Image (cartoon, rainbow, N blue to C red):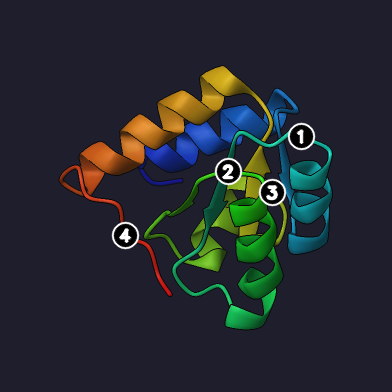
Amino acid sequence: MSNDKLLSFLGLCRRAKKCVIGADVTVESLQSGKAFLVLYAQDASDNSLRRVRRVAAEHGVEMLGTHRSKEALSVALGRLCGVLAVEDRGFAGKLRTMITNEQGGEFYDEI
């Protein structure tokens, strides 16, 4: 694995069982109030993200692009991944900081 701190931290999050992977379980996590942050791959399909975006907005949960491919996320997480929900406030805060620092403090929201 490369020396990508974000991917390494996502792997740690997965091993700690503090995230769920996939659009359907992300929606379930949002609806049950467990999700603190939603992350998605740069090449995640609009079909996969459309419902997730709507439910995240309804529940006031932030969505951030990782600027990593599905392949890179999948390798780091050990499972095919285009979108995931972080279910721990501490992990979510650290990931949010890592992504915003990497992107020069700007949020990259897609429409």
Nearest to N terminus: mark 3 or mark 2: 2
Q: Which residue is mark 1?
A: 33
Count of all numbered marks drawn on residues in the image: 4
Task: Verify CB contact (< 8 Å) between mark 1 and mark 2.
Answer: no
Callout 4 secondary element: loop
Left or right, 34 with respect to 56, comes to right
Position of the C terminus, as image quadrant, is bottom left
Identity of the residue drawn at 31% across and 60% down: 108
Q: Which mark is residue 49?
A: none
User: Please, which residue is most extreme toward the top here?
Assistant: 90
Depth check, front residue: 93 or 79: 93
Q: Which residue is mark 3?
A: 78
**Residue 87 image position (x, y, % from top left):** 69, 31
Task: Verify CB contact (< 8 Å) between mark 3 and mark 2.
Answer: no
Q: Classify mark 4: residues with Cα within 10 Å, few (<14), some (14-19) or many (20+).
A: some
Q: Amino acid at mark 4?
A: Tyr
Q: Quadrant of residue 34?
A: top right
Q: Classify mark 1: residues with Cα within 10 Å, few (<14), some (14-19) or many (20+).
A: few
Task: Verify CB contact (< 8 Å) between mark 1 and mark 4.
Answer: no
**Residue 37 image position (x, y, % from top left):** 56, 40
